[in-house]
Each structure stands twice: as C-alpha cells, then as structure tokens.
Image (cartoon, grey):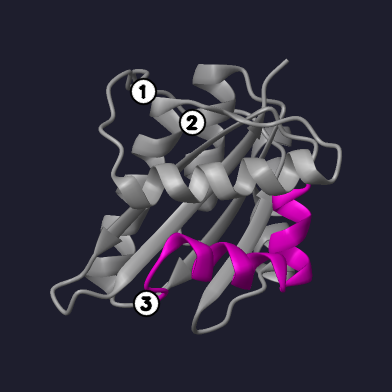
Amino acid sequence: MKVNLLNLMLLLTVIFTMNSCSSDSSEEITANSTSSLIVENYSYSEDELETMKLINEYRVSIGLNPLEKINHISYKSEEHDYYMIDKKVPSHDGFVERSNNIMKLLDAKTVGENVAYNYNNAQGAVTAWLNSPAHKKNIEGNYTHFGISIRKNADGKKYYTNIFARID
C-alpha cells in the first residue's frame, strides 16, 4: 500500500513539476525501486564530451564540484533519446523508471534530468539550460555524477538527455 502511494505521489510530483517546452525540459525526483544490470560500456561522441565539459566548467566557475560521468547513466539517457526520437517529441516520459533504476543500481540518493531538442551544438544546449531556471537548478544541483546522450533523428535534429545523480 505504501509503495503504491509513494509511486502515485512521485507520478503526481513529476506531472506537476514538469517544465516542458519545445526546445528543452527539466525534472528531478527522489525514490527507490526497479532492477536491471549496470551498463558499464558507453561510447561518447565529441558532442557528448563537450556538453559534459561545459557543464563541469560552469559548475567549477561558481564554486561547485565537477561531476563524474557514469556510463550506466549515459546509457539510460541514450535509451530515452531513442524513445523521444520514436515519439517525435522531447519529454520526461519514463523518468520515474529511469530514476528508480539509477537509484537502485547505483545507490543514488537523488536524480535530476534535463532534456533538449534541436540545438546544433553543445554550447547552444548548455546555454539554453543555463537560461532556464529549472534546468539551471539541475546543473547547479547537489549532484556528484552525471551522464548524457545526444542522438539525431532521421532529419538530423538532435535530442539531448542529461541525467544527474547524487551518489555518496
């Protein structure tokens, strides 16, 4: 009963706190459950590495710790990119499941997510996130690790999923 109530509360939190727009979006959650195997291998593109570098440079410039990348988080980000490409819309659909997976497998305490669509390069996406209060909050959040995926649809438009996690 408590698990169902918690899941309902988490779902309502996600629904009420979503800040979606045509170019980008942001989300955060704290919870626990879900299972799978930890994905250890992930091949990063230059755009993904540049986006992580820009986020860490910004964090350090304001006195925050740089985030460490975790391949499993990038893999979960990639899964979501392909989902958004299939649905043809940026979204946070499935965020509770992604968060629960990361919390259970990596023992994360909190998880946040930024998504973006149709930015040509890393700087454009990061600048847009920093100009959005909800996205900036995730970038500046009390996180220790992150992962990212950037994938193109058939028209060459990029979908970004950036997931943050606090792992003590």
Q: Image height check: is 59 above or below 8?
A: above
Q: Residues within 10 Å of mark 2 (few under 14, many from 20)?
A: many
The quarter of the displayed image where residue 1 is located: top right
What kind of residue is marked 1? Ser
For label 2, the residue is: 101
What predominant SS class does the magenta segment belong to?
A: helix
Q: Are marks 1 and 2 in contact (CB under 8 Å)?
A: yes
> Which residue occupies the extreme right position in the image?
63
Q: Earlier in the sequence, mark 1 or mark 2?
A: 1
Using residue 119 as the reference point, say whether residue 30 is left or right of it: right
Q: Residue at x 69, y 62 (%)?
A: 135
Residue 54 screen position, x and y as percent: 58, 49
Can residue 91 be seen in this snapshot?
Answer: no
Residue 60 screen position, x and y as percent: 76, 38
Using residue 143 as the reference point, say whether residue 129 is left or right of it: left
For label 1, the residue is: 36
3 vs 2, front mark? 3
Q: In this picture, which residue range is highlighted in magenta?
A: 118-140
Q: Is residue 137 magenta?
A: yes
The quarter of the displayed image where residue 144 is located: top right
For label 3, the residue is: 89
